[in-house]
Amino acid sequence: MLERLSKLRKNQKWSLQETADRLGIAKSTYAGYENGYRLPSLQSLSKIADLFDTSVDYILGRIEHSHQNKDVIDITRLLNDPDPTLLIDG
């Protein structure tokens, strides 16, 4: 998890402070997540995954690709939506 959090943040070119601000937490708290001396709650993990547009499973190292599980979930939601709306941009 530690390496993935750091990689996701650096891919965005965000500092620890910028990332913490976006999550609404202290810089020291987020630094603790990246350095492994703090564990985020499930709610915090969900917020982090949303911020980086990835899944909790990716952050935890349960899957290898950052969007693998999220894409499947999004497609499943679309298929199960009783009132689907298709938006086309272009």
Image: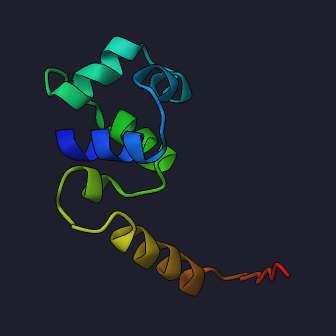
Location of residue 46 by image quarter: top left
Q: Is residue 87 above or below residue 53?
A: below
Location of residue 10 by image quarter: top left
Q: What residue is shown at x 53% (from left), y 22% (from top)?
A: 21
Q: Residue 69: give x, y in percent of width and height.
A: 35, 71
82 with respect to 23 (left or right): right
Question: How many numbered callouts?
Answer: 0
Q: What residue is shown at x 27% (from left), y 58% (from top)?
A: 58
Image quarter in which the C terminus is found:
bottom right
Q: Residue furthest right?
A: 90
Q: Can residue 27 be seen here?
A: yes
Q: Residue 9: give x, y in percent of width and height.
A: 40, 40
Q: Residue 71: give x, y in percent of width and height.
A: 45, 75
31 with respect to 77 (left or right): left
33 with respect to 10 (left or right): left
Relative depth, front residue between 3 and 87: 3
Q: Can residue 1 be seen here?
A: no
